[in-house]
Image: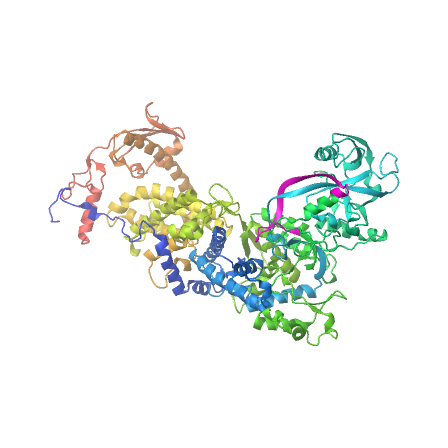
Amino acid sequence: MNDTAQSGAETDYSATLFLPETEFPMRAGLPAREPDWLKRWEEMDIYARQRAAGEGKPLFTLHDGPPYANGNIHIGHALNKILKDLVSRSKTMLGYNSAYVPGWDCHGLPIEWKVEEQYRAKGQNKDDVEINEFRNECRSFAQYWVDTQREEFKRLGVVGDWSNPYLTMSFDAEAQIARELMKVAASGQLYRGSKPVMWSVVERTALAEAEIEYQDYESDAIWVKFPIHSANGAFGTGSFEDFGSSYVVIWTTTPWTIPANRAISYSSKIGYGLYEVTGAPEGNWASKGEKYVLADKLAADVFAKAKVESFIRLHDVDCSRIVSTNHPLRGLGGGYEFEVPLLDGEHVTDDTGTGFVHTAPSHGLDDFGIWMESGRMLTARGIDTTIPYVVDDAGFYTAAAPGLEGARVIDDAGKKGDANNRVIAALAERNAMVARGRIKHQYPHSWRSKKPIIFRNTPQWFVYMDRDIEGKKGDTLRARSLAAIDATKFYPQAGQNRLRSMIADRPDWVLSRQRAWGVPIAVFYNEATDTILNDAMVNHRIGQAFEEEGADAWFKAGAKERFLGNAVPDPENWQKVDDILDVWFESGTTHSWVLKNPQKWPDMQFPAGMYLEGSDQHRGWFHSSLLESCATNGFAPYASVLTHGFTLDGEGKKMSKSLGNTTAPQDVIKQFGADILRLWVAQSDYSDDLRIGKEIINSTVDNYRKLRNTIRWLIGNLAHRKAEETVDYRDMPELEQLILSKLKDLDGLVRDAYESYDYKRIVAALSNFMNIDLSAFYFDIRKDALYCDPISSVRRRASLTVLDHVFDALTAWLAPILVFTMEEAWLERHPGADSSVHLREFPKLPEEWTDAKLDEKWDAIREVRKVVTGALEIARRDKVIGASLEAAPKVYITDEKLAAAVRGTDMAEISITSDIEIVEGEGPADAFRLDEVRGVAVVFAKAEGQRCARSWRILPEVGTDAEYPDLSLRDAQAMRELKAAGR
């Protein structure tokens, strides 16, 4: 360009504009680029740097609930770990030292089951292998999956102490788990008892409540008549002595438990009657003349099931007067020759059945409870209260089921055995059947094998829930736990009531499992004296051996002699307990050896600030950790509990491989990147079940692209920012002050939402700000000033200053969510080997930026702008104009508040028109109006003058500058300054 003026046709003004300049790509390419960021963080040891930066700051510990090390991670794992990372990262950026130590549950049935599957595939039997050899295979299996899952979790962008995780199978962990059990035993809370427990025949072990899931199941239902044996005088309002054809009728969906029947339960709160069958088909089980005692509310239904044609009610019955019945299998195999007493039970209802509950204390908790409560009374009556072992660990009847020995309840494949049919046949032979049928209902299954379980009375190890601890009246494990729940904060709050109800109603804690892979119940027991050995030296030897050799030491030859030493004079009377601990007890102890281990993990805190898991963990890890800590410490191991829902497919259905509706996190990462998964988690309401599918992922990708493009536009414009051109807040135009006021408002919202773990609120607020306040409003208005204003323009420099503040805030606020993208963005502006957005804290924004009056004023200005924009859209639609700069509308305002707001404001700039005229008064009838903005009318008019070849504004002044006749005066000045600057 020479000194003479040139026409627009001869000058390429685009090269003179301050257009965005950046290498930050529009297309993220996350699947390819994210691994590079992971490598960078590993090389710079970002986790160690965060810990160093956090030294001296208040601690916040989110204690990781350990997943099972037995397979690739699924979408539920991804949800859980990303949520934990959101907590840990945001706490760090809020000014806490928030260490995160990942852990794994390495023992227990899930892993043992997988190893057994490998044995079965090879035609081998694990019982033929020496126990520690089998345990070593379980250890190797677990370690393989720990290593695999570790890489998968890291790929999600989760930051933590990955090189030093906690494992329940590490020797020091096994030692401390055993020591925690010893504490429970020493305080008198551990005991050996016999109760019905949930038993998996398929897996040959007792199961905890947390290992149970309910599935649809079809059970055999039978109605059985128990002949009345004796009564205390007349048992009804009528008077009769002949019991020969009178029966108490029970209903059960577990016919196989009839051999274990020892009582019938009724309720004194229910009305009962004596009914006589007056009409029935020939050969019917319920025959004419038989008399049945039934709950009045259920009698008609029972007779319908029994195919009775007619019946009459004889009179009321007081069940407390019925002393006993005969067993319906009386005489079978020479057995069942005992009386069956009637017991008044709170658990009996007249909702279904007959109003009577067949009571088999071997096979039901309610049955067991009422039998034990009635023990003294039954003994006084000469009734043997011994609870029989009717079913063995493989599901076969024992000799305690005379005439039925060898029948099986459930087989090794989880299928029904022949027990039900044999019991029904035996009952029918004795004329004890009234009716039979089938019922589909929810029945407990093992969550691992997916097979039905049974309740079975077995000798097990328990922890008392209601025994006074060390003799302190009222200081029970249940009381401690309920008090601890009340002292804990829950997110969402409903979790408190859920956990409380579970603790309030739960039975004693069953700790023992009849398996091989786990920490043993490392105690010695004298069965004759019902005593657990409490010897400090013995306990020390066990703990020390476990530290050095792992829990395998317990199963080595000579272990009993080695650990007992000379502690007892009669070692032959002490047995080494070889049952292993419930894995929920193991994971429940992690607070004691992770949070209290400063040598290994110096930045952890006890109690933890938070435990975070899925809502099923109210009966799992939250539950067991609470019980274990209350048993050994007297209080909860956590200050707060956060729960999230389950993952469902896009239609809200449960995911299933067989249905083909699963979403694998690995697939999402491969196609879209981990930041997309993280954004999905953050924008979802995790307190409820979360849906994910193709459409939801695509919607998340779309949201991500908008956020990314906003960041990209910021970076591109900030390429022209110079630190020395910073404009002080007080010298900025109102529009810039408005954006900073909104930024300050967001600062409070974001901090509050991160503190309250409300991530969806953050995503919604930032998306709204970036898409509406920035992209669709501020950026749209300021493009002209940023691209076209002279170098000296305060407006341009102020805008760049604001963009810098916005960039700093947004990259920090989004860093816990979009960990890869915000690192990429931050390094684009702040490169360096030691630079990382994840070493920052959330910026502290000046209080002076808050300006409520300015916000209110600009809300009014934007209302006026909305009407102008609506009018321009019609003109654009009708092809009257191609761009808003071709317009110079006339705006009529009758609303005083709106009129006052726009006075002194360059509404042409705000509306992105070349000119505008504001008239305070009513507009013509045919002017454009919006119903939602009262008092504003717009009459469209075209802009007058010539088009500026540089900014495209149409102004009368174009052509008045001698040097640049094709430019506006502003653009002409910009050209002169650029020329003077050598550009």
Instruction: Give the camera-side residue of 777 and 21.
Output: 21
x then y, percent, for residue 389: 73, 55
Q: Does the magenta stretch include residue 449?
A: yes
Q: Magenta segment, which residues?
A: 428-454
* Colouring rule applied to residues: rainbow
Q: Is residue 43 magenta?
A: no
Instruction: Give the camera-side residue of 827 and 592.
Output: 592
Seen in the image, is 292 located left or right of residue 911?
Answer: right
> Can see residue 603?
no
Question: How many labels were placed on the picture?
Answer: 0
- View extreme (top): residue: 925
**Which residue is painted at 33% across and 34% down in the image?**
869
Seen in the image, is 440 located left or right of residue 813?
Answer: right
Query: 844 above or below 343?
Result: below
x then y, percent, for residue 681: 46, 49
x then y, percent, for residue 676: 41, 49
Instruction: Give the camera-side residue of 568 and 383.
Output: 383
**Quarter-of-image position of residue 527:** bottom right
